[in-house]
Amino acid sequence: MTITGEAYFEVARNDRMPFIVQQGGTLVQVLGTHFNMNGYDNEPSVKTTLLEGAVRVTKDGATGLLKPGQQAVAIKTGHDIQVLNDADIEEVMAWKNGQFMFKDATIETVMQEVARWYDVEVVYDARISKHFIADIPRTVPLSQVLKLLELTDQVHFKIEGRKITIIQ
């Protein structure tokens, strides 16, 4: 199976019919598990986060076997896999649970998710160094999300149709 974007899987182990997911040059072989895979075309890496069971992640000959709570990060332009031991499962799974969840996120990270969800274009006229913490239901209208971000007094927006410009 080949994916673009983000997907969550719950797969039973079956040695006779291995389940393999591919995003770009990264392959994830399922060994009976629950896992999330994030690999958007405009992201620099593919992230595989294991919730339960086991998966093997392979990229250009490098291999990582994940344990629950670990995350494999495969940089698309590189040849290795970095395994992080303390993945934030709550943040990784927020999208599946109908939430935007940001913990110490840059405005670029926040707006990238906002742009995907609301299908808008984001333009930057200002550099924002502030990091954001938020837990917002994805059912909230875009105008309210932007208003909540503006309440920090660290970022402001100009909206023209489907184009959102970041201003100071």
Image (cartoon, helix red, strand yellow):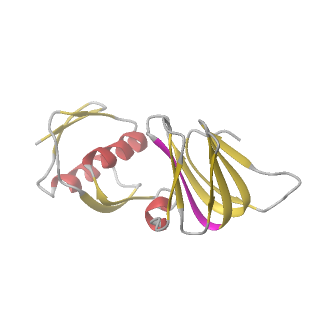
Q: Residue at x 57, y 38 (%)?
A: 4
Q: Nearer the viewer, residue 162 or 22?
A: 22
The residue depicted at 54 percent of the width and 45 percent of the height is: 80
Q: Quadrant of residue 99?
A: bottom left
Quadrant holding the C terminus:
top left
Left or right relative to 130: residue 73: right
Any magenta on residue 50?
Answer: yes
Examine the rendered structure and indicate whether residue 5 appears above or below residue 69. Answer: above
**Residue 143 pos. (x, y %):** 26, 47
Which percent across, then down, holds residue 69? 54, 68
Residue 42 relative to residue 141: left or right = right
Pick the front one: 92 or 164: 92
Against 32, is 38 above or below? Answer: above
Residue 77 picture location, percent across and down: 48, 35
Instruction: Name the one closer to the observer, 9 or 139.
Output: 9
Q: Which residues are magenta?
A: 45-52
In-front residue for pair 140/21: 21
Q: Is 31 situated left or right of 68 in this image?
A: right
User: How many tags in the picture?
Assistant: 0
- Image-based side of 11 in relation to 105, left or right: right
- Main SS type for the magenta part? strand
Query: Residue at horizontal 73%, vertical 47%?
Result: 20
